[in-house]
């Protein structure tokens, strides 16, 4: 995992997750996964058990937040 991907992981799983869980009680967690530099995803886990996978490949931190918030 590159330094940029590590920054995205920390942002997603800490800061963005805290924001999302503050207004959506059905969200259990957010997980950032990087399978390659061109393959990055955020997985939203819900209490219902059905996850939502969002492609965030190449996104900045700001656009990760926009993509995730837009899919809720």
Image: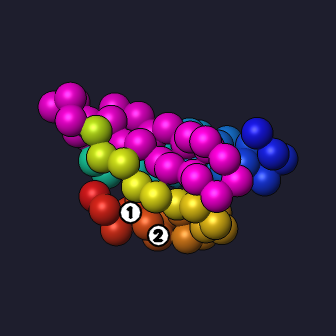
- Residue 33, position in %: x, y? 56, 40
Q: Mark 2 Cα within 10 Å, few/some/many (few <14, many 20+)?
A: few
Please give the name of the residue rendered at 34% of the width and 68% of the height, measured from the top-left corner: 70
Badge number at residue 69: 1
What's drawn in magenta, residue-wise?
25-50
Q: Quadrant of residue 60?
A: bottom right
Please give the name of the residue rendered at 36% of the width and 43% of the height, measured from the top-left corner: 44
Taking 68 as reference, is 72 left or right? left
Label 1 sits on a secondary structure element that is helix
Residue 72: within the magenta? no
Residue that numbered label 2 is attached to: 66
Q: Marks 1 and 2, Cα distance to the nearest angstrom? A: 5 Å
- Residue 53, position in %: x, y? 36, 48
Closer to the camera, 41 or 25?
Answer: 41
Taking 72 as reference, is 34 left or right? right
Taking 35 as reference, is 52 left or right? left
Q: Is residue 36 visible?
A: yes
- Residue 43, position in %: x, y? 41, 42
Q: Is residue 65 above or below residue 1?
A: below
Quadrant position of the C terminus in the picture:
bottom left
Main SS class of the magenta portion in the image: strand
Residue 32: within the magenta? yes
Q: Is residue 18 visible?
A: no
Q: Mark 1 Cα within 10 Å, few/some/many (few <14, many 20+)?
A: few
Q: Is residue 60 above or below residue 54?
A: below
Closer to the camera, 64 or 36?
Answer: 36
Label 2 sits on a secondary structure element that is helix
Closer to the camera, 68 or 36?
Answer: 36
Please give the name of the residue rendered at 61% of the width and 67% of the height, measured from the top-left corner: 59
Q: Residue furthest left?
A: 48
- Residue 27, position in %: x, y? 30, 39
CB-based contact (under 8 Å), mark 1 and mark 2? yes
């Amino acid at each position: 995992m590159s330094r940029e991907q590590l920054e995205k992981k920390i942002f997603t799983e800490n800061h963005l997750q805290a924001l999302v869980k503050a207004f959506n009680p059905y969200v259990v967690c957010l997980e950032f996964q990087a399978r390659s530099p061109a393959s990055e995803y955020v997985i939203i886990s819900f209490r219902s058990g059905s996850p939502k996978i969002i492609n965030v490949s190449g996104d900045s931190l700001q656009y990760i937040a926009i993509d995730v918030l837009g899919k809720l």
